[in-house]
Amino acid sequence: MLTLRCILTTQVKRLVCRPVGRISMQHRMSTSPHPVAAVCQVTATPDKEANFSACKQLVEEAKQGGACMVFLPEGFDYIGSSREETLSLSESLAGDTISRYSQLARTEDVWLSLGGFHERGHDWENDRRIYNCHIIMNDKGDIVSVYRKSHLFDVELPGRGVLLKESAFTIPGPSLLPPVQTPVGKVGLGICYDLRFPELSLALQRHGAEILTYPSAFTVATGAAHWEILLRARAIETQCFVLAAAQVGRHHEKRSSYGHALAVDPWGAVLGDCGGESTGVTLVEIDLEKVRDTRRNMPVQQHRRDTSFYRSLEQS
Ligand SMILES: O=C(O)CNC(=O)[C@H](CS)NC(=O)CCC(=O)C(=O)O
């Protein structure tokens, strides 16, 4: 079931050595080895214990492959089979699930991106609502940032098997968060459906993001049509790396996910893809020189006009 992709150092090096813009071979060869990020793909079910074991195994394998930061997808804790189950399995950040991940981060000495944790909301006792939150944890097991998903997936696509109403159980997050300094670079936080809103990625880029992250559980229909295109577009527009851990396969009788956990470089090239079949992890070197070179060679952020320019149609 479990496959580990791109684990060989030579393979990682080969991926990194794809030509990016005008970076010369000579320049690339003179740089020192770069930190490695692990982008994971899992099939969560309503069984929290089994999900934790599967994720733990991926984190351990990623560490053995040289990763210093591991990215898990939305719903890494569980994917419920009904609204009621999704709500009743939720916990607070002080609960068992996050403590176990904190211990795992410490033991394995890695940073974690824990996307799409089902967190009980501030007024849980009264309203039984949760946040869909993305936690960044350091290698000491401390929580360094908690972003709460701001765009909720309320979508029905007749004939395509998609009917989800996230707002029926989730509170939209109140704000974006400043990108977080991690061992792989400055990480900007999004979650899944947030990927469709370029305003969010541009705001994170303007505030210093070098890497954008979209832990996801994309539906099969929307994934096949949009997933890779959107991720590559966000990478190209912002000239950031984009790391998107993903859910894959059948979670329960009513729900499946598209997979293809992806790592994209600032030129839009796909560095790693976990495929659409099975769980696993893709390891990629993060060479931040690629961010600097891409932005220097094509300074789109400097060419961007001020906000009032893009509003000029509103006044006419
Ligand atoms: O439900 C949970 O437990 C975890 N949350 C999710 O899976 C969320 C909300 S239903 N899924 C998406 O945002 C899919 C987006 C998507 O597929 C698209 O934008 O096309």
Image: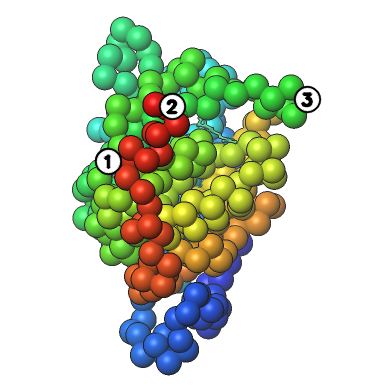
Q: Is residue 37 above or below residue 28?
A: above
Judge by depth and name the residue closer to the eye, 96 or 295.
295
For image coordinates 69% across by 43% down, the residue present is: 225
Q: In the rendering, at what x and y percent does residue 298 appear? A: 43, 67
For image coordinates 30% across by 27% down, the residue present is: 174
Give the number of marks: 3
Q: Which mark is residue 316?
A: 2
Q: In the rendering, at what x and y percent does residue 58 appear? A: 48, 57
Instruction: Residue under label 3, please give it.
Output: 159
Pick whichever of labels 3 and 2 is earlier in the sequence: 3
Instruction: Residue under label 1, please give it.
Output: 177
Instruction: Look at the image and tell me in which quarter the N terminus lies.
Output: bottom right
Q: In the rendering, at what x and y percent does residue 183 appear? A: 28, 64
Mark 1, other Cα within 10 Å: few <14 / some 14–19 / many ≥20: some
Q: Is residue 106 above or below residue 6?
A: above
Q: Which mark is residue 132?
A: none
Q: Coloured how?
A: rainbow
